[in-house]
Image: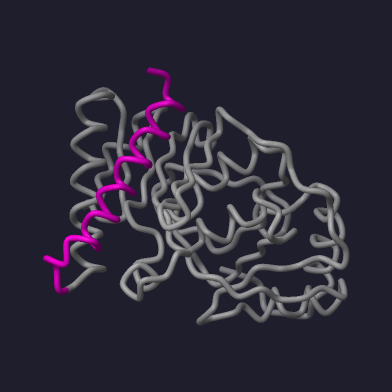
Amino acid sequence: MTDAELAASLAEAAGERLLWLVQSGRYDNLGADGDRIANALLVEALRRERPEDALLSEEEKDSAERLTSARCWIVDPLDGTREFGEGRNDWAVHVALAVDGVATHGAVALPGLGLVLRSDAPVPLAPLRSPPRLLVSRTRPAREAAAVAQVLGGTLVPMGSAGAKAMAVVRGEAEIYLHTGGQYEWDSCAPVAVAKAHGLHVSRADGTPLRYNGPDPYLPDLLICRQEWARPVLAAFASLELPPIQ
């Protein structure tokens, strides 16, 4: 099984387990139990199938040992815990492999929609729409995204998890996902791998490359968008009179 196939298989399996958890009615705290159960499935499988590789998971204690490995699996067992617990569909499972700091292979499962989007099976993008639609957090929309939308004459589309928002660009539900509220590597590694494979622009909000498996897994910002909108978004962001993102 290739790395990309493994990522897709595990993302789908974890998503199915999470759906079973909901349907079983056995668990009182869906969010916490979902994080724990999906993480156990992914960690056990990756340590069995790729024992020589490093692993970074939102739900596992981090270890500096991963920094010595060129290959690091980066997973978010349940991206959008709040949405999952509320019975919404905009949550995801992320499984990705970073090689030499680059998001190389990955899959994002959207179990509530019955979908798995993967880096080894890109699908054609939908026709470009204008003015652009910009995805933002449904609970904490970033002021930078709102300001860029105003510059571009675009509209804001609230949505749940980072994976759901990134895949909405892949699926043609929006053109731009600009996030400046702070994330971690597991929030974006798999979405970035999938988005790149579909020909989308991926970078930091200032246009610099995204790097993974770093000493500090915090990533302040992210841009995933249609190639046609990359330059206008970056120019609009650069024109904003805002404090620098840390």
* Magenta stretch contains residue 220: no
User: Which residue of the protein is positioned furthest toward the top in this rendering?
Assistant: 1
Q: Is residue 206 visible?
A: yes
The range drawn in magenta is: 1-28
Q: Please give the name of the residue rendered at 48% of the width and 46% of the height, measured from the top-left corner.
A: 115
- Answer above or below: position of 189 versus 23: above
- Answer above or below: position of 68 versus 235: above
Q: Please give the name of the residue rendered at 72% of the width and 79% of the height, measured from the top-left corner.
A: 146
Question: Residue 243: percent from the left, percent from the top?
Answer: 67, 78
Question: Residue 180: percent from the left, percent from the top?
Answer: 60, 69
* Magenta stretch contains residue 16: yes
Q: Please give the name of the residue rendered at 31% of the width and 27% of the height, measured from the top-left corner.
A: 53
- Answer above or below: position of 237 versus 163: below
Asked whether, in this view, residue 174 is left or right of residue 31, the answer is right
Q: Is residue 217 visible?
A: no
Q: Please give the name of the residue rendered at 23% of the width and 33% of the height, measured from the top-left corner.
A: 45
Asked whether, in this view, residue 184 is left or right of residue 23, the answer is right
Asked whether, in this view, residue 57 is left or right of residue 28, the answer is right
Asked whether, in this view, residue 79 is left or right of residue 50, the answer is right
Q: Quadrant of the C terminus?
A: bottom right
Q: Quadrant of the N terminus?
A: top left
Question: Residue 81: percent from the left, percent from the top?
Answer: 34, 67
Q: Nearer the viewer, residue 59 or 238?
A: 59
Q: Quadrant of residue 112?
A: bottom left
Give the overall secondary structure of the magenta segment: helix
Q: Quadrant of residue 151?
A: bottom right
